[in-house]
Amino acid sequence: MTKLNLVCALAVAVAFTSQAQAASVCGSRADFVKALNEKFEEQGKALAIAGQNNLLEIYTSEAGTWTILMTSPEGKTCIIAAGNSWEDIPPTKNLTSL
């Protein structure tokens, strides 16, 4: 299953949830991390604290797929974004020249 197909399948599943839950796809962090690793070979790339208490994580693969997860202090993990064509920018590259 391609990343786009998975995201589409998740979107269909979300369509059948309540309106409040339809804003994002949420579940167990352990389940998301396992699926990202097994289905897309994505590994943790970076993490940060967002909004003073949420854990933001970026997962990427050598094939270029990427996923951003957000976990609340209560343990709820949601997919914030996902896509293709991830590319690391070398530390010496000047971003203003892009």
Image: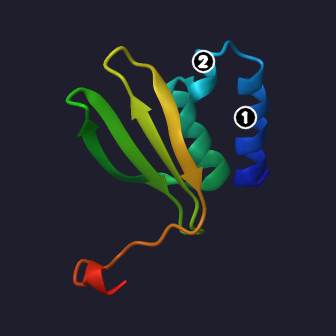
Instruction: Give the color scheme: rainbow, by chain, secondary structure or one colour.
Output: rainbow
Amino acid identity at mark 1: Ala
Q: Mark number for residue 65? A: none
- How many labels, in total? 2
Seen in the picture, residue 15 relative to 9 is either above or below; the reply is above
Q: Residue at x 53, y 36 (%)?
A: 79
Q: Mark number for residue 11? A: 1
Residue 82: % across, % down:
57, 50
Q: Residue at x 72, y 34 (%)?
A: 10
Circle 1 SS class: helix
Relative placement, left or right, of 29 versus 7 is left
Circle 2 SS class: helix
Residue 11: % across, % down:
72, 34
The answer to which of 81 and 61 lies nearer the viewer is 81
Q: Residue furthest bottom?
A: 97
Q: Earlier in the sequence, mark 1 or mark 2?
A: 1
The answer to which of 4 and 32 lies nearer the viewer is 4
Relative placement, left or right, of 9 versus 62 is right
Relative placement, left or right, of 80 versus 72 is right
Amino acid identity at mark 2: Gln
| Quarter of the figure with the C terminus | bottom left
**Cα distance, mark 1 to mark 2?**
11 Å
Seen in the picture, residue 52 relative to 81 is either above or below; the reply is above
Seen in the picture, residue 13 relative to 82 is either above or below; the reply is above
Kindly identify which residue carries mark 2.
21
Relative placement, left or right, of 28 versus 7 is left
The answer to which of 65 and 24 lies nearer the viewer is 24
Answer few, some or many: residues within 10 Å of disc 2's Cα (few below 14, many 20 plus, some between 14 and 19): few
Q: Residue at x 71, y 16 (%)?
A: 17
